[in-house]
Image: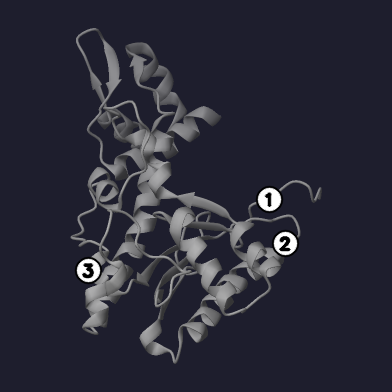
Amino acid sequence: MNKSIVQYYPEKTQIIFFDLEFFVPESDRDGRLGLKANPYKNNHFLIGGTFQRYFPLLNHEKNNIKKEFWIWKYNSEKEMLKDILKFIEDSWNIIKKKDNQAELFFSGIGISRVDIQYLFARCHKYNLKSDEVLFDLFYKSRFLDLETIVIPYFKNKDNMIKTKSTKEILSKFKIERDRGPSANIWEQYDKKDFDAIRERNVNEVSDLPVMYKKILNLIHFVGIINKYSNETFERKLNALINIDDYEFYKQCYVKETDDWYYLNNELTDEQKERLYKIQLEINKA
């Protein structure tokens, strides 16, 4: 096989969904709005986070692995980072069993702007690997940063492209999750309320694959045919798919007075997903 062509093998292809929490000392918490965490500042450090190894090309979740790393379970930040690095190296090693699969995917909200940079900086600080190796582990991956991917699905009112916050994304995709501001985590850490920090973080990572699937449905739905003539819908289409799929397909369209069938714009995510799969069968016929 030509090694210059990247192949995506279902049991090797991984997305690592993750979210990190950072500690900002009280002296650096005031000032302008925006990111306060800085891995190069004194007394800033990584609190921890959750990582989920996700196999998007498999139809089951038995291969998926979720790992948590929290500083209160370690003697030091350095020891925690060693375990995080091992998790990432293990993920790369799964891929390297195939010479022509060269990519690992990282996904989250703001990861290309903050999380990956932070991991690199803290691993560099403790000299856990050479910069050459750290670059390979972190920056030879592909970033699926949801704060930018979702931009086209929002209305633009001021002629300016802007990244989207977690709160905006949750609202857009109707994921019900009460999520307080990141700044609360610093006070929770001060008070040693570790359970609150962990719960918030684990919930956010659990939401990431849900967002990913909802975005996929939107992408797929673009290819769905918006309208059919009466003859095509009731004769030709009926002959291309089985009766159960055809009956479901009919539920997804509305027949108007002009004898054309129009796609229903109020379909659920589950209906859209099934509709897309049927559309693939129709395209093959």
Tell me which amino acid carries mark 1.
Answer: Gln
Quadrant of the snapshot with the C terminus: top right
Q: Residues within 10 Å of mark 2 (few under 14, many from 20)?
A: some
In the figure, residue 253 lies in which quadrant?
top left
Is label 3 or label 1 in front? 3
Could you say where residue 155 lies in the image, as x and y percent from the top left? Answer: 28, 30
Distance (Cα) linking label 3 and label 1: 43 Å
Left or right of 159? Residue 38 is right
Q: Disc 3 marks which residue?
A: 184
- Count of numbered badges drawn on the protein: 3
Please give the residue where the numbered disc 1 appears in the rendered image: 7
Which quarter of the picture shows residue 41? Answer: bottom left
- Under circle 3, the secondary element is helix
Q: Let me know if residue 16 appears in the view.
A: no
Give residue 126's position: percent from left, percent from top: 57, 80
> Residue at the spot x=24%, y=52% of the render?
175
Residue 11 higher or lower than 255, as above or below = below
Q: Are marks 3 and 2 in contact (CB under 8 Å)?
A: no
Q: What's the CA distance linking mark 1 and mark 2?
A: 9 Å
The mark nearer the N terminus, 3 or 2, is: 2
User: Which residue is at a point 29% across and 47% down the rendered structure image?
Assistant: 169
Is there any visible trace of residue 24 in the rendered image?
yes
Asked which secondary structure carries label 1, the reply is loop
Question: Do the residues under discs 1 and 2 have CB atoms within 8 angstroms?
Answer: yes
Q: Nearer the viewer, residue 134 or 201?
A: 134
Q: Amino acid at mark 2?
A: Lys
Task: In the rendered structure, find residue 98 and report the number of the disc placed on it.
Answer: 2
Q: Residue 268: x, y in percent?
A: 26, 41
Mark in front: 3 vs 2: 3
Residue 122 pos. (x, y %): 52, 73
